[in-house]
């Protein structure tokens, strides 16, 4: 009777040095994971602990004396809702304008038949090293009539040089010249080719650009501090800053006990406001992470 050998694939036996190497690698990655994860867990645990526990330093990993006092104080401020709406507005429209302008700048610069593209790239790269400075930028924004308007947070920083370089490299690697020539022979115009061919093939880099610009817009507060005067147009980050300063500054007429309680609440609000301000970005990132990694790997090839 003939015995049939098992067709199951055999595992390659690892040598002793390979096992030691893998153990060291896994140990190193575990340490890195703990280093990255600990601040996140600590901030969240502190945000749901009592003000006394946070101020006294008793929170080091898990929540102590569970309390939502920080969220109650932060979310009870009506400016929080206004700040959230403003930040969503700036993030959405700012990201949309930035992505469109970046693609419109990067794609032509990726084509070898564009006259003077190296000169244009030189000036774009030059802005990464030298800039006009705060005062000249403010004067330009003022002359354009954008002071105390929403455009002041969208237009001045709409295009970033580094994003243009990444997108340009992506187009060079992903949109071959043969495809462009074939479209031209079929009578396709440049705008139709950009809309019907380039955009569908560029989802990874568009996701990368959208995430970069969205995070930048969401976290921005310095431009709002300079250009905006109306409280009704302030983004969330500026509102959170105002709440933190308001609860940190104590009045001289308060007694000692009230001042201590206010300081404890201010310590708690630091962690609560971090969670409130970071939550939308943390929710958005998993949906674009796959495209983000792919686009960064392709766009990082600087050949």
Image (cartoon, rainbow, N blue to C red):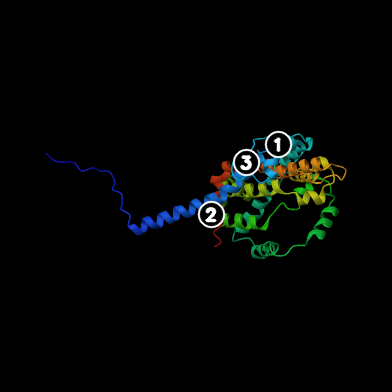
> Residue 102: which disc?
none
**299 and 247: which one is in front?**
247
Compared to 118, does 230 lie above or below? Answer: above
Q: Position of residue 92 (x, y in %)?
A: 69, 42
Question: SS of the residue at dot 3?
Answer: helix
Quadrant (top left, top right, bottom left, bottom right) of the C terminus = bottom right
Q: Which label belongs to residue 45?
A: 3
For marks 3 and 2, the one nearer the N-term is 3
Q: Where residue 179 sits: x, y (%)? A: 53, 52
Q: Position of residue 189 (x, y in %)?
A: 62, 49
- The dot on residue 298 is 2
Q: Distance between the residues labelled 2 and 1?
A: 41 Å
Dot 2 crowding, Cα within 10 Å, few <14, some 14–19, many 20+: some
Q: Which mark is residue 71?
A: 1
Residue, far left: 1
**Do the numbered discs 3 and 2 sit on residues whose CB atoms are within 8 Å?**
no
Residue 11 seen in this snapshot:
yes
């Amino acid at each position: 009777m003939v015995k049939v050998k098992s067709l199951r694939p055999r595992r390659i036996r690892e040598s002793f040095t390979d096992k030691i190497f893998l153990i060291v690698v896994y140990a190193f990655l575990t340490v890195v994971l703990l280093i990255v994860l600990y601040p996140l867990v600590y901030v969240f645990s502190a945000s749901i602990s009592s003000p006394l526990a946070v101020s006294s330093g008793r929170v080091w990993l898990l929540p102590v004396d569970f309390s939502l006092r920080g969220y109650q104080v932060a979310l009870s401020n009506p400016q929080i809702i206004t700040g959230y709406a403003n930040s969503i507005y700036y993030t959405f429209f700012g990201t949309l304008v930035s992505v469109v302008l970046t693609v419109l700048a990067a794609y032509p610069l990726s084509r070898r038949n564009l006259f003077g593209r190296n000169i244009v790239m030189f000036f774009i790269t030059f802005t990464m090293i030298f800039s006009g400075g705060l005062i000249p930028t403010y004067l330009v924004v003022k002359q354009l009539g954008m002071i105390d308007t929403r455009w002041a947070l969208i237009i001045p920083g709409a295009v970033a040089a580094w994003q243009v370089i990444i997108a340009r490299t992506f187009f060079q690697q992903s949109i071959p010249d043969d495809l462009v020539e074939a479209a031209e022979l079929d009578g396709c115009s440049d705008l139709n080719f950009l809309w019907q061919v380039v955009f569908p093939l560029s989802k990874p880099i568009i996701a990368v650009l959208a995430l970069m610009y969205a995070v930048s817009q969401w976290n921005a507060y310095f431009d709002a501090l300079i250009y905006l005067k109306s409280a009704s147009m302030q983004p969330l980050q500026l509102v959170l800053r105002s709440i933190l300063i308001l609860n940190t500054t104590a009045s001289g007429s308060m007694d000692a006990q009230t001042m201590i309680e206010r300081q404890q609440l201010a310590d708690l609000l630091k962690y609560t406001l971090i969670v409130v301000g970071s939550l939308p970005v943390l929710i958005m990132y998993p949906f674009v992470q796959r495209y983000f990694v792919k686009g960064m790997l392709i766009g990082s090839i600087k050949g």
